[in-house]
Image (spheres, rainbow, N blue to C red):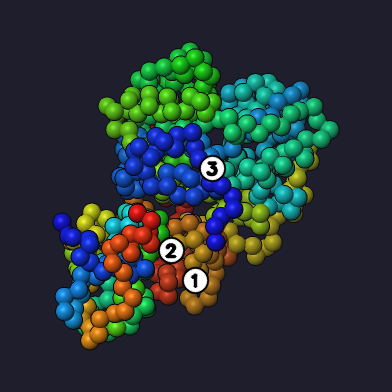
Amino acid sequence: MSDPVPERTSPLVDVHTQLGASFTDFAGWQMPVRYTSDLAEHAAVRTAAGLFDLSHMAEILVYGRDAAAFLDAALAGKLSAIELMQAKYSLILTESGGILDDVVVYRLGDTTFLVVANAGNREAAFTALRDRSSGFEVTVDDQSDDYALLAVQGPNSRAILEATAGITELALPLDGLRYYRATDAFFEGVPLLIARTGYTGEDGFELYLRTTSAVSLWRALEKAGEDHGLVPAGLASRDTLRLEAGMPLYGHELDLETQPAQAGLGRVVALTKHNDFPGRAAVEAGPAENARVLVGLASEGRRAGRAGYSVLSGDTVVGTVTSGALSPTLGHPIMMGFVDPTLTEPGTELAVDVRGTAIPATVTPLPFYRRKK
Amino acid sequence: MTDKTALKYTPEHEWLDIDGNSATVGITAFAAEKLGDVVFVELPGEGTAITAGTVVGEIESTKSVGELFAPVDGTVTASNSAVVDDPSLVNSDPLGEGWLVKVSFDAAPDGLLSWDEYSALVGE
């Protein structure tokens, strides 16, 4: 059967094709899954730098007098508390405390915020924000189609950005830009937002700008990266990088049925703030006593449990793997999955049913990989 | 360089290099490319009796798991230990050093595809 929904493409699709990328469908977008080798791209990000096209991500602008109060009322976190050009990881919850999306929110002005949502949740996130905005003097504006997002990730990222021709007028020098902070700049005269954020477990930057300048910025970054080991990197490496870094992926570790506390994100919900927000009562009541909890699992050998595989204790199914791969950096299988709440202690010996074979797996603290500072 | 037009193919993206009543079997470059970097290969041992269409091995990449289907009723006469030790051979040389098993059979399998038919199937 043919897919009735047309595939969406990034403004960089021709660049990817020229680079010989293999493409994959990701939330209705045709995005590069790899250019040459997932493992080489993964290693480049850990040791030098990788260049990612993340233009499928959704950019929702929230502005108006009540923007901060609105976000406090719509999201799980206290966004009114973040400073100008600070970023914060947050959640959009359902009334029942499930996770509708996980987002990064940037404060671009006193009354202007940028909410970056997952591509697959663009409509759901936008609709929830819009529906929750009634009574506030605020505009919720889905600008996803106008924004490109490029990421430079890896230890050489800063050197590459500093060497990139055309990036000018930084409000803050990059060596003074802290993690989860952003700065305004220009690229060839077009506004550019540079954020020290990422999804790889390495130092790195995410760059937001208009789609019309995306190809030009990609070329300039590639050129600046020639002397710094920069390689284009696809979504396959992004997935193994974030898994090593213990970062959840919506649709795998996070979904409508999972409360933040189950996924280890209890700290993201600001129960200290005074206002109500969707999901507050449910989160305060907490997940069911026997609700499964996210853990890391590590195995020996080379066969990794994959999303959907059962986690076993003896012959009993005690959980489900949500993400898994042979860790390129560590050389052994790593997994995230939900297990019964009595089995979360690091060192607990469990097993994963890998297509009929019970492979021993040990509960392991997240993240699996932490970069040296 | 193996002449891909001289090989036979299955719709499960395997190639067969048939010589009388035996064949060398591997996965196609198309399949290897789709899988991504292969990190684990499990193959049936020498002497294993295999039945056409059943799963007899696994080819696992960082991203996904591919299954090796028996292309014919027969017996495994050799399995490539080099590819078990270095699964990246499946990516670097899928039609050569990345071969997987050799099988012997009484009757040649039906329904194999020519290169033209296979390449039409995968749209390349």
Which residue occupies the extreme front position in the image? B116
**Mark 2: which amino acid?**
Gly
Determine the residue positioned at 39% across, 34% down: A15
Q: Are the residues tagged 1 and 3 within 8 Å (C-beta)?
A: no
> In front here: A183 or A338?
A183
Instruction: Look at label 1 and name its amino acid.
Output: Leu
Which mark is nearer the camera, 2 or 1? 2
Mark number, residue A312 = 1
Q: CA distance from mark 1 to mark 3?
A: 40 Å
Q: Is residue A189 left or right of residue B94?
A: right
| Residue at (68, 57) in percent of width and height | A287
SS category of the residue bearing label 1: strand
> Which quarter of the figure has residue B14?
bottom left
Q: Residue at x 51, y 48 (%)?
A: A26
Residue under disc 2 on the same chain as residue under disc 1: yes
Image mark for residue A55: none
Give the answer, above or below, for where A212 lies relative to A186: below
Q: Circle 2 sits on which residue? A: A305
- Compare marks 2 and 3 and give the one earlier in the sequence: 3
N-terminal of the pair, mark 2 or mark 1, is: 2
Badge 2 marks a residue whose secondary structure is: loop
Label 1: few (<14), some or many (≥20) within 10 Å? many
